[in-house]
Structures are given as structure tokens and as C-alpha cells.
């Protein structure tokens, strides 16, 4: 509900990834997709408003 102070920034979304080093092409595709997702104000707002994991994943898949 409240942002976490991280240095000089207030953080509201943290994503932890586990990708093998040999999956560089997959990582590149993923980061392109992720950057498009978080740069869209409506999509980002929907992610931040998700009440549980199921709703969060549904918003990602839309």
C-alpha cells in the first residue's frame, strides 16, 4: 500500500528474476516486454492495484 524508500526513490514495484546466463536472448525479449509494460501508465497502475498474486498475473497477461 505504501512505497518503500530505496535511497532517494520511493519504490512500489520490485521484480526478482531467475534467468540462466545462457538464456541471453530470452532475457532480451523479457526486458523489452517488461519495459513496455511498466512504461504504460494504465498497465502499471493496474499492476500496482492488484490485491493478490492471481490478479497481478491476470494484469500482466492482458
Image: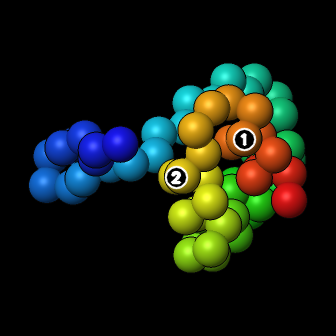
Image location (x, y in percent) of residue 49: 54, 52
Residue 55's place in the image compared with 37, above or below, is above
Nearest to N terminus: mark 2 or mark 1: 2
50 or 26: nearer the eye? 50
User: Based on the displayed image, in which of its 4 quarters is residue 44 positioned?
Assistant: bottom right
> Residue at point 77% right, 60% down?
33
Image location (x, y in percent) of residue 54: 75, 33
Residues tagged 2 and 1 counted as in contact (Cβ below 8 A): no
> Residue at point 21% right, 55% down?
9
20 or 37: nearer the eye? 37
Q: Residue furthest left?
A: 8
Residue 29, disc? none
* Quarter placement of the C terminus: bottom right
Give the mark count.
2
Counting other residues with Cα less than 10 Å from the Cα at mark 1, is it few (<14), some (14-19), or many (20 or more)? some
Circle 1 — which element? helix
Residue 37's place in the image compared with 10, above or below, is below
Whether residue 9 sits left or right of residue 42 in the image: it is left
User: Based on the displayed image, in which of its 4 quarters is residue 27 positioned?
Assistant: top right
Whether residue 10 sits left or right of residue 36 in the image: it is left
The reply to whether residue 8 is in sight is yes
> Residue at point 55% right, 64% down?
45
Circle 2 — which element? helix
Counting other residues with Cα less than 10 Å from the Cα at mark 2, is it few (<14), some (14-19), or many (20 or more)? some
* Quarter placement of the N terminus: top left
Residue 48, disc? 2
> Residue at point 76% right, 51% down?
60
User: Based on the displayed image, in which of its 4 quarters is residue 56 positioned?
Assistant: top right
The reply to whether residue 24 is in sight is no
Residue annotated with mark 1? 55
Image location (x, y in percent) of residue 39: 58, 73
Amino acid at each position: 500500500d505504501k512505497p518503500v524508500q530505496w535511497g532517494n526513490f520511493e519504490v512500489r514495484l520490485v521484480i526478482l528474476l531467475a534467468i540462466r546466463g545462457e538464456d541471453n536472448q530470452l532475457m532480451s525479449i523479457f526486458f523489452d516486454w517488461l519495459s513496455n509494460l511498466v512504461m504504460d501508465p494504465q498497465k502499471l497502475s493496474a499492476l500496482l492495484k492488484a490485491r493478490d498474486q492471481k490478479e497481478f498475473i491476470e494484469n500482466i497477461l492482458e
